[in-house]
Amino acid sequence: MSIAAVIGLGTMGAGIAAVLARSGMTVRGFDVSAGAIEATRRKLPSISGVLDDLGVPARGSASDIVLTDALEDAVAGADLVIENVPEEIGLKRAVLAEVAGLVSGSCVLASDTSGIPISRLQEGLPSPERVVGMHWSNPPHIIPVVEVVAGHGTSAATVDWMMATVRRLNLIPVRVKRDVPGFVENRILYAVMREALDLVERGVVDAEDLDTCVSWGIGYKLSVVGPMSLLDMAGLDIYGSVASYLNRDLCSRDDVSPWAEEKIASGRLGLKTGEGIYAYHQDEAASLGAARARRLVAVRRALDASGEGGP
């Protein structure tokens, strides 16, 4: 049985740890924050219920996950360590360097960074060949895709080991062939969000109608037909005709939307503060999260049943 450690619990740590434990791994979760540890402990039973609903085979239990604020205890004897700390390159490098000094030379060091190039995280680390990107999507216990990203120093053996490990977790590995910022999923997502913010900011559409259009239009379609398949379905000649005039008019800004920046500066960050693009009632965050989880589970089960999704 493999031993895995999740370093930094945050938003996604509980879900990642639960998936690892479900596969039969011995799992330890670490955070410097007692609050994060307690929040993870509270989340684990409901996450286990979601995994039950998805029909994920139970070769282990989230109730066996050990949560600790002692890094040495978390990584002792680990075969896999997943760094999941905030998106600050200095912090991530420091954590990976400290972990590298505590584990065996065969332990794989994975980063769940959302887009910092793995090659930059490898710099100055001993044995960079064992450092690899393992980018989960939120919520990690529901979204089955995991991006596997090699840095310049990552060995082919490490990449192959990680691809096989993701499959053993009952998830879908995607091999990212070039270590570009944002990898694949977030590059696509941020291109969509850039255009969405621009359309709302320019008064082309209200935020709620934009969400409706994307969720029930392209989002609904893309869950079954991926973008490259969609090009073939529509016809590359049609794409060429529309792109010839539309591409010039799409948002191409390389900074952050001023509309979003103003909200950030005023502390309106979204669900976590009670207001962002939308306003939320005091207890709405938990109920929204549960409702969205139920819908995501239903969609994944439908795709699995149809053969359009799943490992």
Image (cartoon, grey):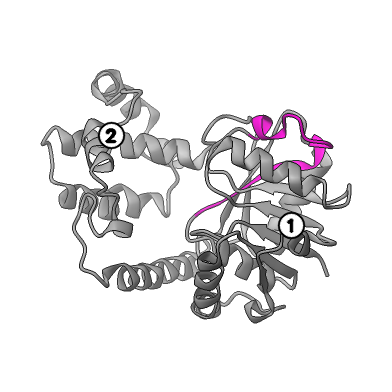
Can residue 155 be seen? no
Q: Name the residue beneath numbered marker 1.
A: 165
250 lies above or below 135: above
Residue 295, labelled with which disc?
none
In the rendering, at what x and y percent does residue 67 appear? 65, 70
For the N terminus, the image quarter is bottom right
Residue located at (63% from left, 66% from top):
17
Q: Is residue 281 left or right of residue 73?
A: left
In the rendering, at what x and y percent does residue 75 appear? 77, 59
Neighbour tally class for label 2: few under 14, some 14-19, many 20 plus, Cα within 10 Å: some
Q: Is residue 144 magenta?
A: no
In the rendering, at what x and y percent does residue 5 appear? 71, 61
In the image, the segment drawn in magenta is 118-137
Badge 2 amino acid? Glu
- Residue contact between numbered discs 2 and 1, judged by CB atoms under 8 Å: no
In the rendering, at what x and y percent does residue 270 appear? 28, 53
Q: Is residue 108 left or right of residue 15?
A: right
Cα separation, mark 2 vs mark 1, equals: 36 Å
* Depth order, front residue of 33/28: 33
Can residue 72 be seen? yes
Q: Is residue 134 magenta?
A: yes
Q: Is residue 55 left or right of residue 157?
A: left
Q: Is residue 111 left or right of residue 182?
A: right
Is label 1 in a helix, a strand or a loop? helix
61 lies above or below 298: below
Mark 2 and mark 1 lie on one chain; the one further toward the N terminus is 1
For the C terminus, the image quarter is bottom right
Residue 66 figure quarter:
bottom right
Residue located at (52% from left, 42% from top):
87
Badge 1 amino acid? Thr
Q: Name the residue beneath numbered marker 2.
A: 195
